[in-house]
Image (cartoon, rainbow, N blue to C red):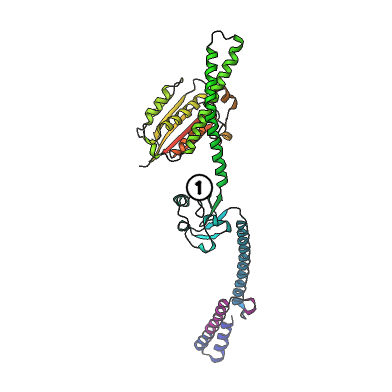
Amino acid sequence: MSVIFVILVGGLLTDAWLISIAFSLFGYIVWMYYKTYQFYTWVINGTGQNNVPDSDGIWDKINYQVLQDKNKSSSRKKRMNALLKRSQSILKGFPYAAIVLNQNNEVDWSNSKSVLLNIVKNDRGQCINNLIRSPKLYKLLNANEDGSEIEIESPKDSSIQLLLKIITIGANSKLLIARDITQRNKTLEMRKSFISNASHELRTPLTVISGYLEMIKEDKNLPKSLSTPIDTAYEQTKRMQNIIEDLLTLSRLESTDDIQDISTSINMEKVINHVCQDLNQVVTVEINTDEVIVGVETEVISLCANLIQNAIFYTPKGTKIIVRWYANGGNKLCLDIQDFGKGIPNKHLAHLTQRFYRADKGRSKEQGGTGLGLAIVSHIAQRHNAVLTIDSKVGSGSTFKVCFLVNN
């Protein structure tokens, strides 16, 4: 408005409208340049509250908006710094080693417990794979599976066992947690050793007791009043022998991880037919592939036998049972055991592979099961690079699936 006023006054007084317009616009451009320079100087000097350039009109609004945005930014920065300090305080007090990694797996931050992994403050910016040479850790970092875990020896002290876990904490960051599990592993080893030794020691006396009970059972002069107690004692002895054999099997499976030296090619069609021919119940077998797997044949036979016998034990007599062997995708060969029994409630599914866990305790005792079959199946599956999944619906039946990964 000021420029128009000047043009009008100059034009009326001099009657030279073009000159008036030119001089007025030139003056306005100089003024705008000066205001822009003032604003630029203020911005590069930090946009301080005390040195806001004198202005009015649109420039006053611009300066005010800049100050408002700066105050908001400062407030956000303070909150973020407070949150960062709080997070670091929590991680510093964390009882485990905690290392923050960026998208390139470089160390951004670590707490004092990270010495378990031989990582110190000076290692910031270093790639974790260069600091810890471990194929397991390399696979863990590249797996992109939140919550994945591995066990490794401490780079600082080989006698210390560490459990490493990855947790995603942002789009470009993740948290590596390391926990000392040396004592836990020692306790587990003691438990395994005790179970193995106790099972071995119990096997001989139970065999003797079972033999004598069988002799008494078959004695024609045995009084009728003792017949039932002797039969019950014999059955319970046999059940204890089965439990001990399963415990020894589990102990052997847990004591050896590498099966390469004892692996052979296994024809699953022969294995399945061999297992099914000794059963009292008719089982439908569907073989849809002739591909073989590599593993320990006795263990794979045990896996099949346990799953098929479970399907028979825990379904009414005459229930249809289907065993399938098929290729599932490019690198998976799967074994399905499907029954059409009463099914298993969802609350039990996650616990079925635990030792001695029974979804139907009454029926398990009636059938004489040991409660170790699925624990054995789970261990054998892990040893053969396979995955056991259980799908069940109450009233419709259950499907136990074991998928072996095959390297093409």
Q: Which residue sits at x=49%, y=38%?
A: 254
Q: Is residue 32 magenta?
A: yes
Magenta region, main secondary structure = helix
Q: Is residue 6 magenta?
A: no
Q: Which residues are magenta?
A: 27-53
- The correct choice, above or below, for 268 with respect to 183 in the image is above
Amino acid found under the numbered disc labelled 1: Glu
Q: Which residue sits at x=51%, y=85%?
A: 26
Toward which corner of the image does residue 121 lie, by quadrant? bottom right
> Residue most toward the right?
50
Q: Which residue sits at x=55%, y=52%?
A: 177
Toward which corner of the image does residue 296 lie, by quadrant? top left
Q: Is residue 168 left or right of residue 55?
A: left
Q: Quadrant of the N terminus?
A: bottom right
- The correct choice, above or below, for 346 with respect to 220 in the image is below
Task: Indicate the position of residue 36 as horizontal and vertical percent values.
Answer: 54, 79
Task: Indicate the position of residue 314 as horizontal and vertical percent values.
Answer: 53, 25
> How crowded is the residue under tag 1: few (<14 C-alpha within 10 Å), some, or many (20+)?
some
Question: Which residue, given by chain and number where applicable, does mark 1 sit on?
Answer: 151
Q: Nearer the viewer, residue 171 or 41?
A: 171
Q: Is residue 27 visible?
A: yes
